[in-house]
Image: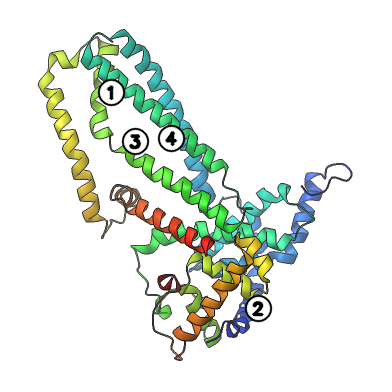
Amino acid sequence: MELEDLKTAWQQLEHRVEVAEIRLHEYREQRTVGALRRLLMRMTAGQAIQAVLSVMAIAVAAPFWIQHRHIPHLLIAGLTLHIYGVAMVCSCVVQILLIGQIYYTESVVMCQRRTLEFQRLRVLSSLALGLPWWILWIPVTMVGAERFMGTDLYQVSPGWIQVSLVIGLCGIGASIGVARRLAAHPPESKVLRNLIDSLSGCSLARTIRQFEEIQRFAGE
Amino acid sequence: MASNDGPPPSDASKKAAFEDLLAKHRRLVFKVAATYARNPDDRRDLVQEILIQTWRAYPGYDASRSFSTWMYRIALNVAISHRRSVVYRTRHVSEIADDDLSAIPDSAVREPDDRLRDLYRVIERLDDLNRALVLLYLDGYNYRETAEVLGISETNVATKLNRIREWLREEFATPDGKKGTSWNSKI
């Protein structure tokens, strides 16, 4: 077969799309937005909400660790939350900026490169900021208990904190292990499928592969 | 920007100008959608998304440049991004063998005409970027225009098209063309 042979078929396809054109008006009048746009809008809104929540967390964590800087475990708990909050804000801001730089009017290579840069950051940050919650709930609880109830949980039950930390670390490892196992046969649920895809590293690998494809395509 | 002469156009006149341009080039949208979306629902979503994105980008359109080239960029970018999300969404639900097009529950792919079947068979085996390249070639775009839409050099366009030609000759040498190697795996 020759590439030129396909031109005939292409012309045939043109005739067929004439039929589809009749329904063009119908599409234009639809008020629902497409899947991709909905996704991007949801992501931007999601990032903005996360950024606001993170700033609120920082607003609680910063005075907390300053106030308790002489008590090591409370200082560590407060600082952990503060650092996590800053990391979350940075991630959200960078993602919002990257979304804003995706212009469909740019050349295909440039636009797809930017899209994949955004995806790569999103996947990495969801891993880096999501997995620590196996442990992060402990300083959150400690700060909350001290801040709102005046109870120092570590003093009340240091063993519980230590055991929870160990369980959390095991949980991180187990999450990755189970996700990798399930990645070959992911469940029907979209939420679970996305979670497994992200935790198993499949989505990151896919993004890197697509990025390499673009580099190869543009570089030759 | 569109034009610096005279007062800024009103929304109504802008929309009318856009609709005129769209009427002239709308087949482009459907062709891109037919090339990148497998089933009618996806195609409908994709057409809608391309139109929305084109309308959103329209205020930044430079009227001194070709509308079809500008629109092709938008259509291809939206289509590739759309396809990535759709391919992942459906990949685990129904794995489709590249060379078994009869298994695809899509009326547009199940074409009775052999030539159209061949076209889809070739398209299915190309990765997203090379698919865009072939689509532009089949639509009569020259190397310069193709390079402009894709963002690569003209030499690169020529090289890639030659390689695709060779791949086609080798891959579809037999009438059924069922060797099964995708273009992507060959590079």
Q: Kindly report the distance in space between the C-alpha atoms of the residues bearing marks 4 and 2.
A: 48 Å
Q: Earlier in the sequence, mark 2 or mark 1?
A: 2
- Residue contact between numbered discs 3 and 4, judged by CB atoms under 8 Å: yes
Q: Are marks 2 and 1 on the same chain?
A: yes
Q: Upstream in the sequence, badge 1 or badge 3?
A: 3
Label 2, label 3: how far apart the Cα atoms are: 51 Å
- Residue drawn 54% across the image and 60% down it: B79
Query: Which of the two labelled residues, at mark 3 and mark 4, occupies the earlier sequence position?
Result: 4
Horizontal side of residue A213 vs B160, given as left or right: left
Are both tags, 3 and 4, on one chain?
yes
Ranked by sequence position, the earlier of labels 4 and 2 is 2
Q: Which mark, by number, is residue A129? A: 3
Amino acid type of the residue that numbered disc 1 sits on in the rendered structure: Val
Whether residue A22 is visible to the viewer of this picture, yes or no, is: no
Circle number at residue A91: 4
Callouts 1 and 3 in the same chain = yes
Whether residues under marks 4 and 1 lie with C-beta atoms below 8 angstroms apart, the answer is no
Viewer-side residue, B183 vs A178? B183
* Residue type, label 2: His
Are circles 1 and 3 on residues that touch, CB within 8 Å?
A: no
Circle 4 packing at 10 Å, graded few (<14), some (14-19), many (20+), is: many
Q: Position of residue A85 (x, y in %)?
A: 38, 26
Tell us which disc is closer to us: 1 or 3. 3
Q: CA distance from mark 1 to mark 3?
A: 14 Å
Indicate which disc, 4 or 1, sits on the residue closer to the N terminus.
4
Q: Are marks 4 and 1 on the same chain?
A: yes
